Amino acid sequence: QVQLVESGGGLVQPGGSLRLSCAASGSIFSINNMGWYRQAPGKQRELVAVFISGGSTNYADSVKGRFTISRDYAKYTVFLELNNLKPEDTAVYYCNAALQTTRWGRLGDYWGQGTQVIVSS
């Protein structure tokens, strides 16, 4: 069984910064994609930033230049540095990973429980 556990959310003033962490644990053979999504109240879940197969990254246009994704795949961990936060960044941030639990197993999609980020003065 695979678990993704996020941490680092909280309340921050506009212009402030936060650092989110996500650690995957359990039976993991390989990770294909791993990254962050968010869901604001009344809105659909959207991509924030993700590492895709091959190591390249993909960012939402709304966070480019402000958020930075990094990783330590040896520890099955990804981080999201959130800078110059805006009220519209308020959302629950979810970690996601597409991974294989065995060499010949199919790719499975896994989600963390989410961590709340509130940007408010």
Image (spheres, helix red, strand yellow):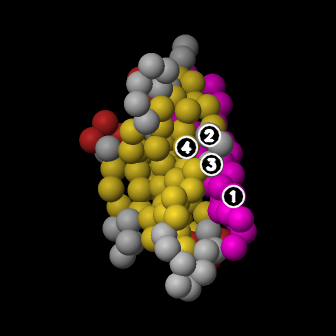
Say which residue appears at 55% left-offset and 43% top-offset: 94
Read off the magenta span: 1-27
Q: Main secondary structure of the magenta part?
A: strand
Q: Secondary structure at mark 1?
A: strand
The three-letter amino acid code for the residue at tag 2 is Gly
Q: Are marks 3 and 4 in contact (CB under 8 Å)?
A: yes
Say which residue appears at 63% left-offset and 25% top-offset: 11
Residue 31: image location, x then y, percent: 52, 72
The three-letter amino acid code for the residue at tag 4 is Tyr
Q: Are marks 3 and 2 in contact (CB under 8 Å)?
A: yes
Q: Are marks 1 and 2 in contact (CB under 8 Å)?
A: no
Would you call the spot at circle 4 few (<14 residues within 10 Å), some (14-19), or many (20 or more)? many
Say which residue appears at 69% left-offset and 58% top-offset: 3
Q: Secondary structure at mark 2?
A: loop
Q: CA distance from mark 1 to mark 2?
A: 12 Å
* Residue picked out by circle 4: 94
Q: Are marks 2 and 4 in contact (CB under 8 Å)?
A: yes
Residue 85: image location, x then y, percent: 46, 31
First in sequence: mark 3 or mark 4?
Answer: 4
* Residue picked out by circle 2: 114
First in sequence: mark 2 or mark 4?
Answer: 4
Tag on residue 23? none
Would you call the spot at circle 3 few (<14 residues within 10 Å), some (14-19), or many (20 or more)? some
* Residue picked out by circle 1: 3
Tag on residue 112? 3
